Image (cartoon, rainbow, N blue to C red):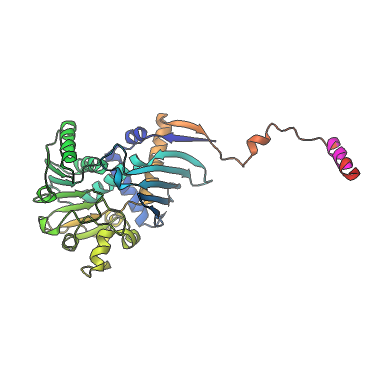
Amino acid sequence: MKILVLSQSDVRRLLPMRECIELMAETLATLAKGEAVQPLRSMMRIPTGILGVMPAYLNPGKALGIKVISVFPGNHGTELDSHQGAVLYFEGEHGSLKAVLDASAVTAIRTAAVSGLATRLLARPDASDLAILGAGVQALTHLEAMLAVRPVKRVRVWNRTLEHAQDFAARQTTRLGVPIEATPTAEAAVRGAELICTVTGSREPVLKGSWLSPGAHINAAGSSVAAARELDTSAVVRAKLFIDRRESTLNEAGDFLAPKKEGAIGDDHIRGEIGDLVLGRIKGRESPGEITLFKSLGIGVEDVASAHFVYHKALKSRTGVSVEFGGQKFGSDDLKDVKRPSAKAKKKTRKRAVGR
């Protein structure tokens, strides 16, 4: 049996942002309809980071897979991504491993694509002033996602290290042709913004509710553990909250759990899942002045759907490296060339054994 190995550049080429946004709409709608299996992620903590395991199954396409990923926040500002690992894609009928994909690329693209979907569903149609808190990989893909769904004309970016924000602004202004300004403070980036993306590795709030303008939409995508938050309590209380998965939010979302622990909100503060918005089951923005918030955790169905999509495009375009792997019964290859003893030889063996 052969498996397909797909590199970071392969994934980037085969999973363009606009196509991924549509794919995430289909995927989260499938999840909302109950046609997927989505357990909570399992995480092992070590002093320098986290090793996470995220399995999922989507029934309509019989897509089965698991993402194994390390999250090392200390990599921010280095040549290494903070999220590294692999997505293993299996076919759902026989459980055969079909592909191994670079998880950094899958994570970067699908996370921003879901934020793009949430923005399309919740932000004001004319929102054009964007603030990005963070200047890493997710800042780049979120910028691409926002440009795909809204007429962005102005971008401000903040990072704890101002030089990183300045470098990001210079490179992406040249590449995308959109004016991007690096700001010395998070408040300077957020004041007056209509779209806000928080994509930091911070464990403490970097966004305050007092900075938010009426009508703003927030995508909070940087934190995915209960002990970390990017938004203060005021920001969450002021906003209509939408999520990717209720069970995950109630167990893993520090941005929700911290204000809940303080008694500022309850579980009913969650208006619903993005998949329900896609299906038209719940209402999103109901007035221009409302503040809306999408709390993104990132869930396994997004990775598995992406892997399914990329794998089939790779087959058509002959992309990736094919590698011999297992699949048949263990040891069957070794037995092919073994000369089996004849009945006469077996009889002689039995006689020798009796004579002993």
State the image quarter where residue 37 is shown. bottom left
The quarter in which the C terminus is drawn is top right
Which of the two residues, 277 or 338, is positioned nearer the viewer here? 338
Would residue 281 be seen by someone viewing this image from the given angle?
Answer: no
Residue 34 in view here: yes
Q: x, y percentage for residue 351? A: 89, 41
Judge whether residue 345 is colored magenta: yes
In the picture, which quadrant includes the N terminus?
A: top right
Viewer-closest of 203 and 174: 203
Residue 79 magenta-drawn? no
Horizontal and vertical percent position of residue 224: 31, 54
Residue 316 at x, y percent in the picture:
41, 31
Q: In this rendering, would 202 be left or right of 330?
A: left
Q: Residue furthest right?
A: 355
In terms of image quadrants, where is residue 84? Answer: top left
Q: Residue at x 32, y 60 (%)?
A: 246
Query: What is the span of residues highlighted in magenta in the rendered image?
Result: 344-351
Majority secondary structure in the magenta region: helix
Pick out the residue farthest to the bottom: 263
Q: Is residue 345 left or right of residue 274?
A: right
Q: Residue at x 34, y 59 (%)?
A: 248
Residue at 28 percent across and 55 percent down: it is 274
